[in-house]
Image (cartoon, rainbow, N blue to C red):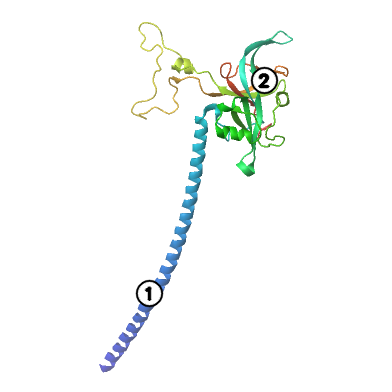
């Protein structure tokens, strides 16, 4: 009996020793795990903070760009058109003079628009990837008195020795070689007879118009029993989707906005009168500002 008790006591003492060793070793493992987890957590927080700061800086830069574009658009035609679409080449700005009929040698009558050019079309700035992030040529048009411009506008033009001009627009191109500040653009060097061009201008505003005039909708019967003569009709379902889809053709403002007509043909370049005869109609009324560029043909003059 005494031997059994002694054996049991020895076994218990061994178990206590083993438990004590286990209890000592566990805190060491937990401390190492905690330290490694803290290191991982701190590195993750630092990385996340850096990414967050980069995103905030990008958002601030984008907001500044949007504000600058809105500020330029509020200035109207006197604002500089910034970072526009890629053009096939540097163009000119002109003034719509009116329309006339040109007869060919075969007796065919061609309706043409006459575009004249006031003093201007001078390069005021050449932008590059290194300084501005993109390549473009800024051109000024139509001479005005000094008092018609603000001090920043006068200073911008006096920096390159250019005359005071009302309109400044940029032509974004792939290559700006051959252009330098205060260089006058020559009409006959840029456009030739038979060239295709794109013309941009503000269309004639026609005020608030209905669906028939604005979108060429068909009208209903005009008889006495008809309930819808020139009304718009249904504009969508009721419960589902329960709203009118964006872009629905409805009555609203007609004209009075920026319009682009592509691939118009040059009938004649008059060097003596400094005028262009363009086949067809262009946006706006006589006296309207026009932006004339070489027609963009994908794969030929633009990528």
State whether residue 161 is above or below residue 290: below
| Residue drawn where x is 44% and y is 67% of the image | 36
- In the image, taking residue 260 as reference, residue 251 lies left or right, namely left
Furthest-front residue in view?
A: 147
Q: Residue 2: image x %, image y %?
A: 26, 94
State whether residue 227 is above or below residue 38: above
The quarter of the displayed image where residue 20 is located: bottom left
Q: Residue 292: image x %, image y %?
A: 63, 25
Earlier-in-chain disc, 1 versus 2: 1
Say the numbered circle drawn on residue 27.
1
Q: Residue 30: image x %, image y %?
A: 39, 71
| Residue drawn where x is 51% and y is 37% of the image | 68
Furthest-bottom residue in view?
A: 2
Q: Distance between the residues labelled 1 and 2?
A: 87 Å
Quadrant in which the C terminus is drawn? top right
| Residue drawn where x is 48% and y is 41% of the image | 63
State whether residue 99 is above or below residue 54: above
Residue annotated with mark 2: 265
Furthest-right residue in view?
A: 105
The quarter of the displayed image where residue 300 is located: top right
- Comparing 234 with 270, the one in front is 270
């Amino acid at each position: 009996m005494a031997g059994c008790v002694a054996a049991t006591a020895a076994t218990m003492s061994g178990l206590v020793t083993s438990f004590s060793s286990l209890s000592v070793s566990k805190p060491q493992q937990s401390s190492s795990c905690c330290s490694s987890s803290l290191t991982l957590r701190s590195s993750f927080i630092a990385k996340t903070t850096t990414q967050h700061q980069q995103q905030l800086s990008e958002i601030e830069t984008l907001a500044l760009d949007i504000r600058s574009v809105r500020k330029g658009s509020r200035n109207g035609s006197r604002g500089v058109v910034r970072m526009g679409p890629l053009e096939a080449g540097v163009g000119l700005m002109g003034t719509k003079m009116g329309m006339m009929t040109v007869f060919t040698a075969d007796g065919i009558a061609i309706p043409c628009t006459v575009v004249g050019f006031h003093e201007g079309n001078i390069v005021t700035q050449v932008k590059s990837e290194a300084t501005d992030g993109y390549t473009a040529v800024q051109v000024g048009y139509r001479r005005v008195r000094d008092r018609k411009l603000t001090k920043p506008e006068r200073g911008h033009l006096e920096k390159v020795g250019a005359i005071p001009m009302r309109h400044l627009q940029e032509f974004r191109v792939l290559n700006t070689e051959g252009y330098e500040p205060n260089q006058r653009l020559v009409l006959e060097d840029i456009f030739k007879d038979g060239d295709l061009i794109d013309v941009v201008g503000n269309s004639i505003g026609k005020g608030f118009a209905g669906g028939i005039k604005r979108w060429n909708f068909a009208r209903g019967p005009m008889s006495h029993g008809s309930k819808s003569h020139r009304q718009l009709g249904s504009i969508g379902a009721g419960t589902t989707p329960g709203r009118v889809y964006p872009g629905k053709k409805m009555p609203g403002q007609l004209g009075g906005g920026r319009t682009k007509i592509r691939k118009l043909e040059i009938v004649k370049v008059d060097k003596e009168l400094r005028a262009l005869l363009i086949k067809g109609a262009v946006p706006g009324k006589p006296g309207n500002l026009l932006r004339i560029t070489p027609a963009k043909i994908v794969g030929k003059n633009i990528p």
